[in-house]
Image: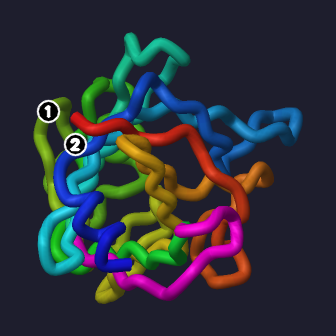
Amino acid sequence: MTKIKAAMLGDWQSIALELRPSAARNADGSLKPFYLRRVFKYLPSDRFELEIVNSADPYGAVPLVRIRIGGHMAWQGPHPIAPGAQKVDFVADEAYEVTPLAPAFADVLNKVASAGYAPWAVDAPQSIFGKSFAPFALKEGTNFMEYDLIYLRGDLLFWGARNVDGRGFDSEQNRPTNLQIPLVRK
């Protein structure tokens, strides 16, 4: 595991816009698509920084929101998906910030996440760290955490693929069992 950690140090980014199933559903019950780009930094002492930009379209032409998360990774041992893969828990115990990038998204946040926040506005980041935030099902006083996996192959960094039914990685039972599109060195 020491070799994996040393090889991961540095900056990583999405190859292209990524598609994931979201927990939200369309009127017909099908899952809504979730388009995003990731920039990830693995830092010494098992620290990480992650920036996600979610877009409304499959080409990233209409960015909706920027999310910045910072915290620690807890390594939990081998994952059976591939030789060298590791179970890793991501804990956002340092920072969690949301920045609306589109007026419509700011309007939605002003309707569903106004308590305890300044009015939401385009390009105005707000910390949601340690606070209740209904759109992401965050509860006050708790740190966001995901049960994920890491697999490093050369200059490709894989995490777990989202569950096709939209379930989050909120428990050991929901830890991913497949790899998603990798990040590449930045």
Q: Is residue 155 toward the left or the right of residue 22 in the image?
A: left
Within-10-Å neighbours for mark 1: few <14, some 14–19, many 20+? some
> Considering the numbered disc 1 on the image, is that residue within a helix, a strand or a loop?
loop
Query: Type of residue at label 2?
Result: Thr
> In the rendered image, which residue does mark 1 sit on?
123
Q: Nearer the viewer, residue 56 or 183?
A: 183
Q: Nearer the viewer, residue 2 or 142?
A: 2
Q: Residue at x 31, y 71 (%)?
A: 3
Q: Quadrant of the N terminus?
A: bottom left
Is residue 109 something one can see in this rendering?
A: yes
Q: Position of residue 94 (x, y in %)?
A: 16, 75
Q: Residue at x 41, y 80 (%)?
A: 139
Residue 96 higher or lower than 99, as above or below: below
Residue 151 higher or lower than 125, as above or below: below
Q: Quadrant of the C terminus?
A: top left
Q: Are marks 1 and 2 in contact (CB under 8 Å)?
A: yes
Alpha-carbon span between mark 1 and mark 2? 6 Å
Query: Type of residue at label 1?
Result: Asp
Q: Is residue 4 toward the left or the right of residue 167 in the image?
A: left
Report which quarter residue 127 is drawn in.
Answer: bottom left
Q: Residue at x 54, y 17 (%)?
A: 58
Q: Position of residue 83 (x, y in %)?
A: 61, 67
Q: Position of residue 160 (x, y in %)?
A: 58, 57
Q: Position of residue 161 (x, y in %)?
A: 63, 51
Q: Is residue 73 toward the left or the right of residue 60 in the image?
A: left
Residue most extreme to the right: 28
Residue 57 higher or lower than 117, as above or below: above
Say which mark, if any, is on residue 99: 2
Q: Nearer the viewer, residue 69 or 5?
A: 5
Q: What segment is highlighted magenta in the picture?
A: 71-84
